[in-house]
Image (tube, coloured by chain):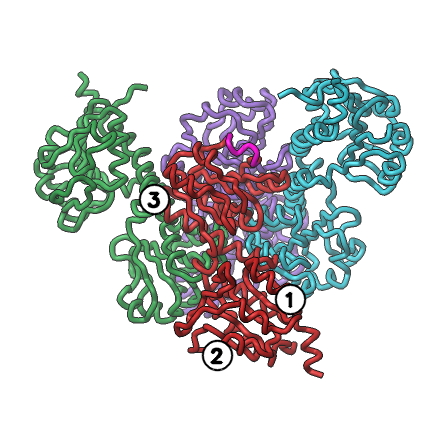
Chain colours: A purple, B green, C red, D cyan
């Protein structure tokens, strides 16, 4: 099977270990890889390294920004290479030709706006179902690691609450059960509560949350204010809250602090706790995605 | 909380153990219950029993036909009461007032057509997400029971293929793993394959099915011809196929027979292997559903 | 590695599918195999078949009686070959030279006495730790199969009691948990109760058994009267008892019958529910055991 | 049920959080508790606090030294109270009357010798079966925590080797499987290898260890040199070794260092990673043990 990515110019802007792994894989696939903010040793010697991102993206058929590490103002702060200024996507995006695939973990509003304005094909990698489900594995392990490090009890036999039974909640509930925890799942969805029964969890309608306050560890995956002060006030102060919901999370962190409850907002866990696994997920999915996206252009290109 | 179903006239037409359980629960809730084809002893003494279904549905604010046991011609064949003629829904539906909720496990095309024609509010109970997920539990156990009864090996350590990772496939994979099977999941969906990885299964793209033929037990949940003769031919004749997909299943059963492969189409498992659990699922969900559906009318009624 | 069993004369007396499997494996290993009461087709054509067990054992360096199917009077009743009289070990043992290894599943007292009297090296295969642990797998599955077939509920979410946490109890508890049951373990041993906690079961001191009567399924593995009428009387009559303890079991079966409680004494499950797996266990362990036992004689023989 | 420990004088020498928890429980039971090296606040105000351990043990009917934190020379170094000199058991033991129960986690040789010499009833708490099994829970979680913190991969899907299937190995294998690891168990015992099969692990005879070198994480529980340099040399340098075997462990740590393999000797995990759970284990077991040991004397006392 011929490798459809061979010779294709691709630019990557900024990295942590995950993008370094992906870059190595793309080099192995024979892409014409252009890197900004990457280490220059090892296998990555075989790529072109740029200082100026605007130079790097010239002629690239796809642009890959990092999974994490972009801020609200559009700066990419990730980079393992020689200390240099961060990359300002606000300046870079306008020079990318329209129709170009632009991959990024999660697009902050400013990036989404610019991508639309300049006609880029925006792909939020973290939202791709396959990647999101696979990332739920290191995310769940990371959440458990945070809980282990911040409690004086074992996960085994601990009364745990998992809020939300989406991709992360499902994997997290499964792993907690695997360690012998007593797991309750809170959700608004009667279907998800039924699934939690099948999984051997105790179902708890989110509307009835206040009826149960005896949890030792609460894991939240719902990105909405589901743990307000009015509920926190009912908890034992030794309860640990591990909130892995994106954005602002679902906890009144200020309220928790005042009540003496430890509440940790743990984000970007895959890259932190299992960067190699997280890199493997990108390596397994992104080249395939690029092949599909570049398929037609590539054929044009060869003609 | 006042019970909103008290005094409400409801008709139930035909039963197996599940509907008997549901009827008892509806009596406990104080409904004005009218039964056709039910046993008349025990708690069910307190309901009105009819011979003629057209009489029974008169004035009923909701009609409940069985989860299983309706045939393609619209006859309800279930019934534990004194031997009587089966109930012909083709004759009953026209006398039901339009807008009346009409609940049935799965509606055969003829029923669906009549429900539309006469303006009934058709509810297929087996398709309600909550019920479908809960039913996946006895379904999965039933599929495993069928496999245990028809193989000379243990499920433990058996190479099992689960085709499809929907509601039943997910629960089935989980239970097989719980018994120590080696589970491969075949699916068209990359998201479902990612979930199968999280679950500790081996993922297998349905497109690559022919690359793997060493399964000892194949469980199919996909209602489409996914196990054609061209694949069956590659299997060891000792392979067991347990097909729980609805309708015609996904197996070329004729081909299997000719190849000497045992293929079992196992349908309606919850009612067969765990009728009490299956009844409990209805008891837990249907009254609540009726309350929601009848809520407004009920209020009208009380005025 | 040279096969140490090649050419060694071994006699097997009586069979079910397990001994047929073992015989085939011993033929593959090149033993000089003599069979009584076996089918004569397939691979077994290559063995010598005898009508008279006393002829068969002449000169044999080891004798293998069946895993199951010997009665209290010393008769082997197993046999898949042409209808013939059962084998009377009381007549056979006296003609076996002393020091000869004599393998049998479980030796009834009469067999044990004769083996001692005639100086045989008696090996009870079912008591060999490795075999006993491996057999716990089909035994546990068989016990679950019996429970599935005799209850109207799912194992999932059922309140189960496992009495005894030995080899079978441990595997059974593990499988029940894998299917989502709520498992309590009753034991006299504080160490076993601690292990049941690690396994995610509820521990219950056997001394406190009467404090808990709300089980839906009771599995007994303790070969002593642990479920006397005084306890059975406290149970709901819908409770199912599956007793897999050897000998007389641990249940007052007569009492259960009178109280209308279904109590099933399920013995020899591996050969019944998973004969191929049970055969594989013998194939994996017995040739190795014979090699060790015959090792020295074998060397003598070669000189 | 009357509390048999009420009024009984008991001395505790040195503590970490576990002994603090146990002391609180003994106070609740009404013992006449004498403490050396303990914090003096909270519930512990109600005990007598001593500076001089020789004073504290006078008249005590049982002495409790810590689970951990005694050194080879017989000094107890644990203590959360005001900074003071460590306790020298070599000086304390001679003043304890013979026949007195003397409880300590693990007795170093010097302590064992003195206990024998002065006729104490030595109880090594960590060796009590019930405690050892319960402690395997926080130990296994601790080992997993160490692995999570020191690898770039997830436990899920990691190729793990567990060496030894004793109390800790069994719990560890169970938890690793619960997180989705691929677990191989290495053991000398064919019975333990059979158990590992039942548990869904891959069995590996310790004699064949060199045949398998592709592990990503190796957990050792065998207190003997089972991971010598000759084996370490065959491993990928990214392999992580977590050795939880007591004493010197089972790894050539010097060899690992030279080969660039990270090998961590993780001891006393329960007290470190889950001190509250570890305290609960003592609270659940030690008072009961003391009741049994002091039973007769107590009865004497009451007369």
Same-chain check, marks 2 and 3: no
Q: CA distance from mark 2 to mark 1?
A: 24 Å
Chain of the residue under the numbered disc 2 shown in the image:
C
Q: Is residue C62 visible?
A: yes
Label at residue B274: 3
Between label 3 and label 1, give the one nearer the viewer.
1
Q: Which residues are magenta?
A: C206-211
Q: Residue at x 54, y 47 (%)?
A: C223
Residue under label 2: C49
User: Can marks 2 and 1 be said to lie on one chain?
Assistant: yes
| Residue D135 picture quarter | top right
Q: Residue at x 36, y 50 (%)?
A: B142
Quadrant occupied by the C terminus of chain D: top right
The answer to whether tags 3 and 1 share a subunit is no
Query: Residue D276 appears at what percent x and percent y?
Result: 66, 31
Pinpoint the chain carrying mark 3. Answer: B
Provide the major secondary structure of the magenta segment. Answer: helix
């Amino acid at each position: 099977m011929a490798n459809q990515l061979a010779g294709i110019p691709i630019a990557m802007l900024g990295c942590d270990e995950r993008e370094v792994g992906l870059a190595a894989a793309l080099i192995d696939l024979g892409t014409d890889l252009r890197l900004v903010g990457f280490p220059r040793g090892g296998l990555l010697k075989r790529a072109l390294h740029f200082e100026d991102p605007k130079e790097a993206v010239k002629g690239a058929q796809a642009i890959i920004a990092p999974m994490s590490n972009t801020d609200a103002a559009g700066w990419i702060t990730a980079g393992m290479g020689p200390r240099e200024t961060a990359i300002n996507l606000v300046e870079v995006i306008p020079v990318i030709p329209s129709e170009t695939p632009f991959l990024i973990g999660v697009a902050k509003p400013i990036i989404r706006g610019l991508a639309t304005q300049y006609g880029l094909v925006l792909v939020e990698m973290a939202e791709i179902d396959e990647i999101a489900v696979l990332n739920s594995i290191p995310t769940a392990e990371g959440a458990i690691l945070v809980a282990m490090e911040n409690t004086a009890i074992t996960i085994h036999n601990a009364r745990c609450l998992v809020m939300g039974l989406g991709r992360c909640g499902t994997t997290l509930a499964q792993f907690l059960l695997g360690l012998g925890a007593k797991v309750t799942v809170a959700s608004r969805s009667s279907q998800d509560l039924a699934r939690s029964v099948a999984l051997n969890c105790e179902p708890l309608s989110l509307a009835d949350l206040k009826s149960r306050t005896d949890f030792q560890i609460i894991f939240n995956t719902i990105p909405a204010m589901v743990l307000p002060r009015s509920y926190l006030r009912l908890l034992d102060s030794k309860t640990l809250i591990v909130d892995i919901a994106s954005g602002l999370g679902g906890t009144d962190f200020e309220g928790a602090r005042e009540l003496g409850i430890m509440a940790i907002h743990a984000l970007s866990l895959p890259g932190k706790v299992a960067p190699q696994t997280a890199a493997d997920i990108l390596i397994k999915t992104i080249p395939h995605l690029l092949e599909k996206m570049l398929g037609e252009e590539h054929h044009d290109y060869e003609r």
